[in-house]
Image (tube, grey):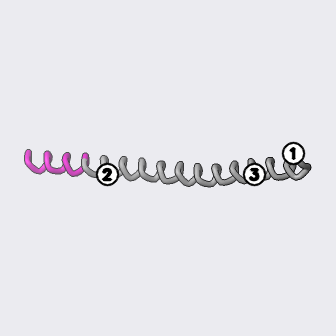
Amino acid sequence: MGAGHFIYIPATVLVGIVIGWVLGSRAARDAFAAEQRRRQDADARAAAKAARGASRQA
């Protein structure tokens, strides 16, 4: 095992950590946005349902 491994192995690990960090943050951001869309859609459906119920009783 040459001296190059003392540079190559930590550099490879560091590159892997950076790539994982970038991909993980992107996935978390996408999941958060999807959850917000789901909540907005559910709120819109609930409001539409309440509006239909109110118009039927009037």
Label 2 residue SS: helix
Q: Which residue is mark 2?
A: 41
5 relative to 41 in the view: left or right: right
* Of marks 1 and 2, the one in the foreground: 1
Q: Is residue 54 magenta?
A: yes
Residue 57 picture location, percent across and down: 8, 45
Determine which of the numbered discs, if any, sits on residue 27 in the image.
none
Numbered disc in front, either 1 or 3: 1
First along the sequence among labels 2 and 3? 3
Amino acid of disc 2 = Asp
Residue at left offset 58%, top offset 49% = 24
Q: Which stretch is magenta?
A: 46-58
Of the pair 56 and 1, the residue shown nearer to us: 1
Alpha-carbon neighbours of circle 1 within 10 Å: few (<14), some, or many (≥20)?
Answer: few
Between the residue at mark 1 and the residue at mark 2, the CA separation in whole angstroms equals 58 Å
Q: Nearer the viewer, residue 47 or 14?
A: 14
The reply to whether the C-beta atoms of the residues labelled 1 and 3 are less than 8 Å apart is: no
Query: Would you name the residue on which mark 3 appears?
Result: 12
Instruction: Return the x and y of residue 49 as percentages of the image width and height.
Output: 19, 47
Q: What amino acid does circle 3 point to? A: Thr
On the rendered image, what quadrant is the N terminus found in? top right
Judged from the image, the secondary structure of the residue bearing numbered disc 3 is: helix
Rendered residue at 14%/47% (across/down): 54
Q: CA distance from mark 2 to mark 3?
A: 43 Å
- Give the x, y percent position of residue 40: 35, 51
Tell me the chief SS of the magenta region: helix
Mark 2 and mark 3 residues within 8 Å of each other at the beta carbon: no
| Residue that mark 1 sits on | 1
Kindly identify the amino acid type of the residue bearing the numbered disc 1.
Met
Q: Residue at x 74, y 47 (%)?
A: 13
